[in-house]
Image (spheres, rainbow, N blue to C red):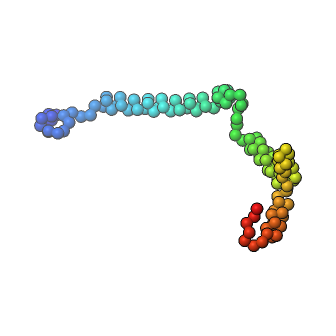
Amino acid sequence: MKPSASANPGHEGSDASLKLIGIIAVSLVLGLASVLLSARWLVRAGDNPERRAGELGSRGNFQHGPDDETAIAEAWADIAAQTQLRLHTYGWVDRRAGIARIPIERAMDLLATRAAARPEGKPAP
């Protein structure tokens, strides 16, 4: 015999519905499956090289890897070589204004000579 709702105040009058539990479980499984399939589709769409090339425009397709590291290393080496050339050679900075550059070692020697010839406590010109 089933107890009535009035006999036990504050308690459920009936058992849980198996049909409702089944519907909720199936809905959760289908929802999870749709999320996973959507994620898989998005990942595969992101791997499409034709789509990526279109996003990059006229710059072309950029790929990470050894070729890019080599290009960066070569550019870095070129900049370092130009810097060393400017630090250790004579040349014009602005010929019209009469501004030239001298090797850094020579500049340090000139400054040290001037500092040594200056009277103590007198500021440099």
Residue at image coords 83%, 60%? 107
Left-right relation of 89 to 73? right
Left-right relation of 36 to 96? left
Q: Position of residue 20 (x, y in %)?
A: 31, 29
Q: Quadrant of residue 42?
A: top right
Q: Position of residue 64 (x, y in %)?
A: 70, 40
Q: Quadrant of the N terminus?
A: top left
Residue at image coords 84%, 52%? 101
Q: Quadrant of residue 71?
A: top right
Q: Position of residue 75 (x, y in %)?
A: 78, 44
Q: Is residue 10 visible?
A: yes
Residue at image coords 15%, 34%? 5
Q: Is residue 111 above or below residue 16?
A: below
Q: Nearer the viewer, residue 1 or 37?
A: 37
Q: Residue furthest left?
A: 7
Q: Residue furthest right?
A: 90
Q: Is residue 70 visible?
A: no
Q: Is residue 43 above or below residue 93?
A: above
Q: Is residue 36 above or below residue 88?
A: above
Left-right relation of 64 to 28? right
Q: Position of residue 116 (x, y in %)?
A: 80, 70
Q: Residue furthest bottom?
A: 120
Left-right relation of 57 to 9? right
Residue at image coords 56%, 29%? 41
Report the label total: 0
Q: Nearer the viewer, residue 111 or 19?
A: 111
Q: Quadrant of the C terminus?
A: bottom right
